[in-house]
Image (cartoon, rainbow, N blue to C red):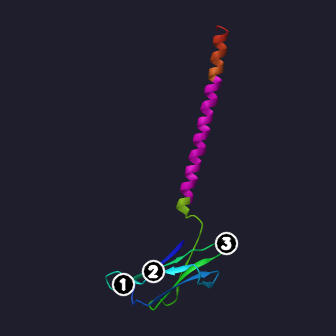
Amino acid sequence: MLVCSAYNFYPKQIRLTWLRNGQEVTSSVSFSEVMSDGDWYYQIHSYLEPIPTPGEKITCMVEHFTLSKPALQVWDPSLPVPERIKIAVGLSGLILGFVMLSSGFIYYKNKSKLLMGCFGRCC
């Protein structure tokens, strides 16, 4: 579910619209009531339950008296850069750990074969 929120606006009249590839979406959309923040400002939330397809562009458009042009927020399904870095570092650590564990196991096996061969012949 996608959420589009508008905070700290006055006056109360506002319009939130979901766009799919530039066309207004009317199905699978719900809205909260315009809620007062208690300090003369308001907030509202809109929810979209999309069935996205590859290459689809989903946008939340906010229209309000105080804006010279509508504010657009495009939904980007890709991971943010900091999250991608965390995944890359984690995978690198996992691979390095596996290589070190494998090397240690191979070293241990070779060393134990060498010792067994030496004891078997009474070196």
The 10 Å Cα crowd at callout 1, few under 14, some 14 to 19, many 20 or more, is: some
Counting residues from the N terminus, which is met first, the one under dot 2 or under dot 3?
A: 2
Q: Circle 1 sits in a helix, a strand or a loop, which is it?
A: loop
Magenta region, main secondary structure? helix
Q: Amino acid at mark 1?
A: Tyr
Q: Residue furthest left?
A: 39
Q: CA distance from mark 2 to mark 1?
A: 16 Å
Q: Which residue is mark 1?
A: 41
* Image quadrant assignment for residue 20: bottom right
Q: Nearer the viewer, residue 51 or 92?
A: 51
SS at circle 2: loop
Question: At x 33% / y 86%, what residue is drawn?
Answer: 40
Q: Amino acid at mark 3?
A: Thr
The residue that appears at 55% across and 50% down in the rendered structure is 90
Q: In the orientation shown, which residue stands out farthest toward the top?
A: 122
Asked whether the residues under the numbered discs 1 and 3 touch, taking CB atoms below 8 Å apart as contact, a structural biologist would say no
Mark earlier in primary sequence (1, 3): 1
* Quadrant location, the N terminus: bottom right
Residue 104 locus on image (x, y percent) = 59, 31
Q: Is residue 7 left or right of residue 106?
A: left
Q: In whole angstroms, how far apart are the C-alphas of marks 2 and 3? A: 26 Å
User: Upstream in the sequence, badge 2 or badge 1?
Assistant: 2
Q: Which residue is mark 3?
A: 53
**Residue occupied by mark 2:** 32
Magenta highlight on residue 69: no
Q: Is there CB contact under 8 Å for labels 2 and 3?
A: no
- The residue depicted at 63 percent of the width and 76 percent of the height is 57
For the record, the magenta segment spans 84-110
* Residue closest to the eye, 91 or 21: 21
Residue 116: % across, % down? 64, 16
